[in-house]
Amino acid sequence: MRLSQSLPLVAEITPEKFEDLRRNISAEWILQALQATGTASVRTRRLPAQVVVWLVIAIALFRNRSIHDVVSKLNLALPGISPTAASSTVTEARARLGHEPMEWLFTVSADQWAHGSARQHAWHGLALYGADGTTLRAPDSPDNAQAFGYSRGYRGESAYPLVRAVGLLALRSHLLAAVAFGDYKTSELAYAEQLWPSVPNNSLTIVDRLFFSAAVLIPLARDGENRHWLIRAKKNLKWRILQRFSPRDALVEMNVSKVARAKNPTLPKTWVLRAIKYQRKGFRVQTVLTSLLDAQAFPAAEVATLYHERWELELAYDEIKTEMLEREESLRSKSPAAIRQELWGIFIAYNLVRLEMERAADDAGVEPLRISFVAALRLICDEWLWCAIAAPGAIPRHLRDLRASLKTLILPPRRTQRSYPRAVKIKMSNYARKRR
């Protein structure tokens, strides 16, 4: 049977029990992902490719269950002689699928969900994004060590190989718009440059001050229409004042280093940006730099306040690593290829939860960040387990109840003036460090 003939059969395989998630990720998207990457199941299997896609998403949501248990509890395997698929069958099915369909599916879904959300919650007509990096631990094995590498500091080599990732986030809904990840030795700036083609026109991207580089920020603004950035200034930066809008708001000019221009000849010798000084009660004077040069259209006080929404990206990473992955020491997959597949499944699963939260917030007339992620995640996981054993006819009513339940998880408004000095309650152990 040809691939084009097998694709409709794969679509029919998915049980009605998955209707709760298929309403967000259509079967057509999955078929297109399998077709684009050549990974559709040509013959009927207990775990065909389309079902394995849902398995990869499910193991991200059910971090406290083994992969084999996820297959069993969610009835992901097709009916057959055995009530569940063997462990070797699950491993082989994931290997056949690979990571490419999951990456394709994330890209297509994020393009629709996250960018639409950023436009819906715009600031002065600009879709609002944040970009920053993080790391995730991989199981300690020679293959992972070679593929991802370790960090090295004054205390020695890290205990686990590290995957470095940089995400582009719709700040006011926490939906991931794009992610670039790979080995640890590649810098965050290099991964960030891979994300800039995903940044739409008429947007503002807030980045961490470590991203300050003419080679990174100039292309972000220059290679699009009305694309802007906002960043906190480093202490050692120097510039020339061209024009003062107010005592703490000025148009400034900076030199672009010869090293940067040698690597990228398209960079200019100088660039013009805006420097805004401000001070919050109890803190030192800070300066933010931005490509928003129009002082009347973008008032300095509003720009300074807006910068602190960058912290939403840190909160999103916390939701993924602490709540979804339950602060486990490492990802669960054992090989580099499986880790890449698992990560794309994690990003899709996170967006699915956040999408439901945004829709519930719209129904309740509140901002998406006013819905509790922890409570929403638990509720959605409980509902999926329930739908896996429920009669298909009862599922639509239960899903309506889910949306209604999400609306009860509204948090109080953010208290933006609270202060959290950086400190730890428990220090590192004095035991010897265990290394390979």
Image (cartoon, rainbow, N blue to C red):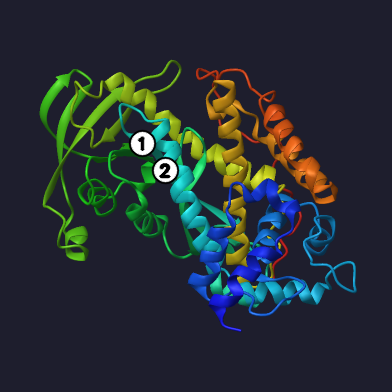
Quadrant occupied by the N terminus: bottom right
The x and y percentages for residue 289 are 27, 35
Q: Quadrant of residue 161?
A: bottom right
For this orientation, the residue located farthest to the bottom is: 1
Dot 2: within a 10 Å radius of its alpha carbon, few (fewer than 14), some, or many (20 or more) residues? Answer: many
Dot 1: within a 10 Å radius of its alpha carbon, few (fewer than 14), some, or many (20 or more) residues? Answer: many
In the image, residue 277 sits, relative to residue 12, either above or below, namely above
Which amino acid, by three-letter code, is at mark 2?
Answer: His
In the image, residue 395 sits, relative to residue 2, either above or below, namely above
Q: Nearer the viewer, residue 203 or 422?
A: 203
The x and y percentages for residue 150 are 56, 65
Q: Quadrant of residue 83?
A: bottom right
- Pointers 1 and 2 in contact (C-beta within 8 Å): yes
Which amino acid, by three-letter code, is at mark 1?
Answer: Ala
- Look at 79% across and 48% down and name the residue there: 392
The x and y percentages for residue 20 are 69, 46
- Look at 52% across and 56% down and name the residue there: 106
What's the CA distance linking mark 1 and mark 2?
Answer: 8 Å
- Look at 29% across and 52% down and name the residue there: 216
Q: Which labelled disc corresponds to residue 18?
A: none
Compared across the picture, whether 74 is left or right of 286 comes to right
Looking at the image, tell me whether mark 1 or mark 2 is earlier in sequence order: 2
Residue placed under numbered mark 1 in the picture: 127
Residue 339 visible in the snapshot: yes
Residue placed under numbered mark 2 in the picture: 115
The x and y percentages for residue 62 are 75, 51
- Look at 15% across and 44% down and name the residue there: 271
